[in-house]
Image (cartoon, rainbow, N blue to C red):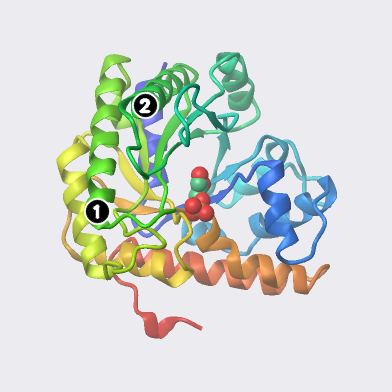
Amino acid sequence: MDISELVTTAQALVTPGKGILAIDESTGTIAKRFATVSVESSEETRRDYRSTLLTTPELGNHISGAILFDETLRQSTPDGTPLPEVMREQGIIPGIKVDTGAKNLAGHDGEKVTEGLDGLRERLQEYAALGAGFAKWRAVITIGDDIPTSACIESNTHALARYAALCQESGLVPIVEPEVLMDGSHDLDDCFDVTEATLRSLFAQLYEQDVILEGVILKASMVISGSTCEERADVDEVAQATLTCLLNAVPAAVAGIVFLSGGQGDQEATAHLDAMNRLGEFAWPLSFSYGRALQQQALKAWAGNLGNPEPAQSALAHRAKMNGLAAMGEYDPAAEI
Ligand code: 13P
């Protein structure tokens, strides 16, 4: 394992003013997203959509890396250029989702554990050979009556740590993503407590597995009120609570922290990131790794203009730019279109 190469890749992913585009929806999830814009999901439509996004002119100005699904890493543009090559030409590092999804945790109603460790070493070696520089594994933690249990938190963080160690062995930077879901009526304090417990468990497990934190990116959910909470915290409260939680639980050695959007609105996710970066400078850069919050407008524009990439590309370029500014605490909502 070449540690300096891992660290270089991790730092490049959180270059100031840049963040990560998450387009790694599984085949089932992308079919649901396409259904919202009345497009059937096929190998061809998925290739067209994702290659439209990845060939956006100057995307590399604000996007440092993109997380792909297995199929996309193997696809090419219509002129035959492999998508990982198109990305590298723009200075965008190809990443790959390697977990195989969150499954019901035995004996624990309403809780999930993410699978995918079997055969992972061999898959990672293949992905590295195909040009990937980093990987992603997402664990899901649900807040509800008497959950999450420590059994759920520990099963998930243990798997995340074993995945991270395998990634580093193969020269890939692991993005570790313990997502505390926004679904539910819980308040900001409940989200804070669960997020802190999850992060503390995660970093204990990473330590146990000898994972090098300088070569790790944390993909975090924000500390935010549940989606059906009656009194939702405002932007400044979310920013303050999230930072306090991260400062309590995330070692300074971690290369960077990127957020998922988790069902937040596009501009809401941008405003939260901006508010955090206005609170000061921290040991780790704070940036974005949004899926829906980067793609929503682009997806609609693509579906409404099949065969003409320009509207989708300009929608994506705009959101990438707004979030790139937010990653530096320089976002101005007046620049929204
Ligand atoms: P969202 O930003 O849509 O939550 O997706 C990010 C992601 O990659 C979840 O794993």
| Residue 300 seen in this snapshot | yes
Mark 1 neighbour density, 10 Å: few (under 14) some (14–19) many (20 or more): many
Mark 2 neighbour density, 10 Å: few (under 14) some (14–19) many (20 or more): many
Task: Residue 172 in the image: state x and y as whole percent.
Answer: 48, 27
- The numbered disc on residue 42 is none
Three-letter code for the amino acid on which mark 1 is drawn: Thr
Whether label 2 lies within 8 Å of ligand 1 gets the answer no
Q: Could you say which quadrant of the image residue 314 lies in?
A: bottom right
- The residue sitting at 53% across, 49% down in the picture is 91
Task: Residue 269 in the image: state x and y as whole percent.
Answer: 40, 64
101 horizontally vs 196: left or right: right
Q: Could you say which quadrant of the image residue 168 lies in?
A: top left
Task: Residue 324 in the image: state x and y as whole percent.
Answer: 40, 63
Spatial separation of the CA atoms under disc 1 and disc 2: 20 Å
How many marks can you see? 2
168 horizontally vs 114: left or right: left
Mark found first going from the N terminus, 1 or 2: 2
| Residue 283 seen in this snapshot | no
Three-letter code for the amino acid on which mark 2 is drawn: Thr
- The numbered disc on residue 157 is 2
Q: Are marks 1 and 2 in contact (CB under 8 Å)?
A: no
Q: Give the SS element for disc 1.
A: helix
- The residue sitting at 34% across, 61% down in the picture is 327
- The residue sitting at 46% across, 17% down in the picture is 166
Q: Which residue is mark 1?
A: 242
Q: Could you say which quadrant of the image residue 154 lies in?
A: top left
Task: Residue 317 in the image: state x and y as whole percent.
Answer: 55, 68
